[in-house]
Image (cartoon, rainbow, N blue to C red):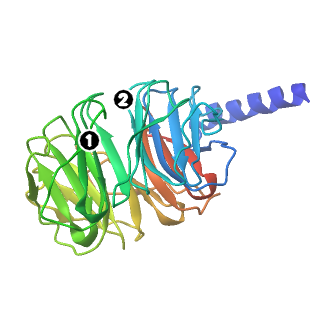
Amino acid sequence: MRIFRVTSALLLIMSYILSGCEPTSSISDVPTQAHLHHIHFVDQNNGWVGGSGGTLFQTTNGGQSWLPLTNNDDSTNLPEKINSFFFTSREHGWLVSLRGEIYYTNNGGRVWRQQAGGLANGLTDIFLTKESLGWAVGGGGLILHTRNGGSSWEKQGTPDTHHLWATHFVNRQKGWVVGEKGTIWMTKNGGQKWQSQKSGVDLPLLDVSFSDEKNGWVAGVDGTVLRTTDGGQFWRLQNTPEQRTWRSVVAVSKSEVWIAGEDGMLLQSSQAGDNWQVKKEPKSANHLMNLCIQKRWIWACGANGTIHRLPR
């Protein structure tokens, strides 16, 4: 059996060399059927994926294997639905839940401690620019901010009560949040003041990503994809070859962007949206929920324990 596996592997490698190409994608084997809402890597080896049922897994070998982190007796019981999380290093991470809770780990996720809870609205996304500065967003227009790594969280107000789905910052001052009814808010001072930006749509916007202070993308329901080249002063509706509910977007550079959504659909453009390539995994029609870029790889996670890795 061992000889057969080695021979098969060699034949596969030779076939790629002779054809002058490489595998277009791979499916990472994670032992769960949970819906995976978020995936995050801090380097090419260390990453986490989590979602429904308090599911949370970690890899230290680039996705070759995934270890569960939610069965640790020393850890506070994690919420039933993990919406999002963010790691600033291999050790320090934060996660948010639908129950309006924030948890923190200083050992890579082996032990989690609750930092905030009892909020009237659930939390949907979290983003940190460094270990001390972070923002979390959620229902009813809720925006929370920490200056001390989560030892305390304070509310930052907007005159809007629409649910907020995602946030992204390019530095400690400039950031954006998006949500229901085409809502886009932007801050230039770390959230002390938020300014409304006109999206031109009245649909839920589910994710936002900027490659720099000027160039950004927003994705949402019914095929909504928006692009800005001036920091959001003007947002342009984009045409894509597929119309899906897009749940995640990653702006890699001024010209490169990836979006993912329903039915396992994944789109990539290296020309700032002028042309798109369909990167859908043919063996999976599970909805994709989140994307993560780590150097030359794009990671995607979604329903029924789905994890994909594709070359950029």
Of 210 and 168, the residue lying toward us: 168
Of 131 and 285, the residue lying toward us: 131
Task: Tell me if mark 2 has few (under 14), some (14-19) or many (20+) residues whose alpha carbon lies within 10 angstroms of its own.
Answer: some
Question: Where does the image place residue 131, in percent across and percent down from the top left?
Answer: 30, 27
Mark sitting on residue 5 = none
Nearer to us of marks 2 and 1 is: 1
Against 81, residue 241 (above or below) is: below
Q: Name the residue under label 2.
A: 88
Tag 1 or tag 2, which sits nearer the N-term? Answer: 2
Task: Tell me if mark 1 has few (under 14), some (14-19) or many (20+) residues whose alpha carbon lies within 10 angstroms of its own.
Answer: some
Question: Where does the image place residue 110, in percent across and percent down from the top left?
Answer: 56, 29
Name the residue: 53% across, 60% down: 264
Q: Is residue 257 visible?
A: no
> Is residue 300 shown left or right of residue 66?
left
**Amino acid under disc 2:** Thr
**Amino acid under disc 1:** Trp
Q: In which quarter of the image is the N terminus?
A: top right
Of 278 and 80, the residue lying toward us: 80
Question: Where does the image place residue 219, in percent across and percent down from the top left?
Answer: 32, 61
Name the residue: 59% across, 26% down: 61
> Is residue 135 shown left or right of residue 196?
right
Q: In which quarter of the image is residue 16?
A: top right
Q: What residue occupies the far front of the structure in this picture?
A: 118
Against 83, residue 199 (above or below) is: below
Question: Where does the image place residue 57, in percent across and percent down from the top left?
Answer: 59, 39
Q: Quadrant of the C terminus?
A: top left
Q: Name the residue under label 1.
A: 153
